[in-house]
Image (cartoon, rainbow, N blue to C red):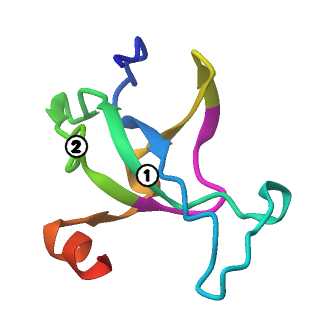
Amino acid sequence: MAVNVTPLHDRVLVRRLEEKETVKGGIIIPDTAKEKPQEGEIIAVGAGRIEKGERIPLDVKAGDRVLFGKYSGNEIRVDDQEYLILKEDEILAKIGGAAKAAKR
């Protein structure tokens, strides 16, 4: 589903990736006790910041998986779906193909 939100400048639109419902011991964690995940997928990116009259493109693109801080960004709701709008400098790391394979 396409989202009609386009971030400006050096901001990105991120959808949080949900964590598993159970832990290794089989215990189910209720929604009220769970922390919000700090991993997400980038849905849309801005054009980049402007420095000295030149536009600097972002290091991330739509589809990248990223890690961000616990209290980073602003939460918004579009079509009953929650998203975060983050500045590029609030992104801590990009999860590459090797890191995804190691998680499996």
Q: CA distance from mark 2 to mark 1?
A: 17 Å
Quadrant occupied by the C terminus: bottom left
Looking at the image, how many numbered discs can be counted on the residues?
Answer: 2
Position of residue 36 relative to residue 102, above or below, is above
**Residue 11: x %, y % from top left:** 40, 35
Position of residue 7 relative to residue 32, above or below, is above
Position of residue 19 relative to residue 23, above or below, is above
20 with respect to 58 (left or right): right
State which quadrant residue 66 falls in.
bottom left
Crowding at label 2, few (<14), some or many (≥20) Cα neighbours within 10 Å?
Answer: some
State which quadrant residue 35 falls in.
bottom right
Q: Is residue 71 magenta?
A: yes
- Which residue bears the numbered disc 2? 58
Q: Residue at x 54, y 61 (%)?
A: 38
13 with respect to 22 (left or right): left
- Which residue bears the numbered disc 1? 40
**Which SS class for mark 2?**
loop
Specify the segment rendered in magenta: 67-75
**Residue 73: x %, y % from top left:** 58, 45
